[in-house]
Amino acid sequence: CGVCILLFAAEVMRELRSVMSSTWAVCAVPSGPRTVLEDGRLVALHRGRSACIIVNNMIRAGIAMMLLTTGVRWLTGTSSITDLILNAAALCFVMDMDECLFATTVPSSVHIFVKGLQPLTYRRGGRNLEAIVPLVSICAICVLVFPLYVNPNSDDMLRVKQLLCAGNQN
């Protein structure tokens, strides 16, 4: 159970890190009255478009956090090892669904255009915080999940086992 929760939390942290990087990069692009693209490099971004990207990133972060909380509760309520592995795989699939939809439903001309774009540059924070914060968050999630969800669920299962299997079994 712990390994599945750890891996799922890492998947969610990867999404949140992507959201933060995207937001920082968009904020680093100068805003202007219109979007300017030169040789595959974003020179200026329209204020409205910048706001839409930031709102979209906030929605992505909110969905990731909701999936994290409900996914962890779902995983901790699963008692079978095979079901636990299948549920963790299903949750990771849900996290990757947007990339799957983009790869299958967007025309190839858009894929070619996106591949031709230069990566956005932004100033990264010092002290490797973008790596440390997800690691600390994953550890905190695992430390909190066991006393809040896993241990009570295990205790309930042991009580049920004792009630059903205790005493004379003839």
Image (cartoon, grey):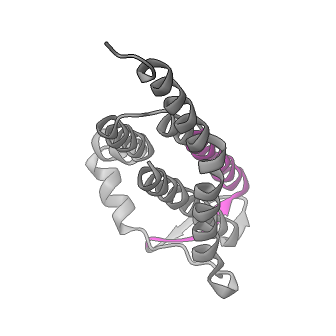
At a point 50% along the width and 30% down the height, the residue shown is 157
Q: Quadrant of residue 63?
A: top right
Q: Nearer the viewer, residue 53 or 136?
A: 136
User: Which range is magenta?
Assistant: 40-69
Left or right of 86? Residue 59 is right
Outermost residue, bottom side? 127
Q: Is residue 6 above or below residue 148?
A: below
At a point 61% along the width and 49% down the height, the residue shown is 145
Q: Nearer the viewer, residue 6 or 46?
A: 6
Spot occupied by residue 72 in the image (x, y as percentages of width and height) = 54, 42
Q: Quadrant of residue 161?
A: top left
Looking at the figure, which quarter contains the C terminus? top left
Residue 157 seen by the camera: yes
Q: Nearer the viewer, residue 12 or 71?
A: 71
Q: Is residue 96 above or below residue 129?
A: above
Q: Is residue 119 above or below residue 90?
A: below
Left or right of 108? Residue 114 is right
Spot occupied by residue 128 in the image (x, y as percentages of width and height) = 62, 83
Left or right of 138? Residue 58 is right
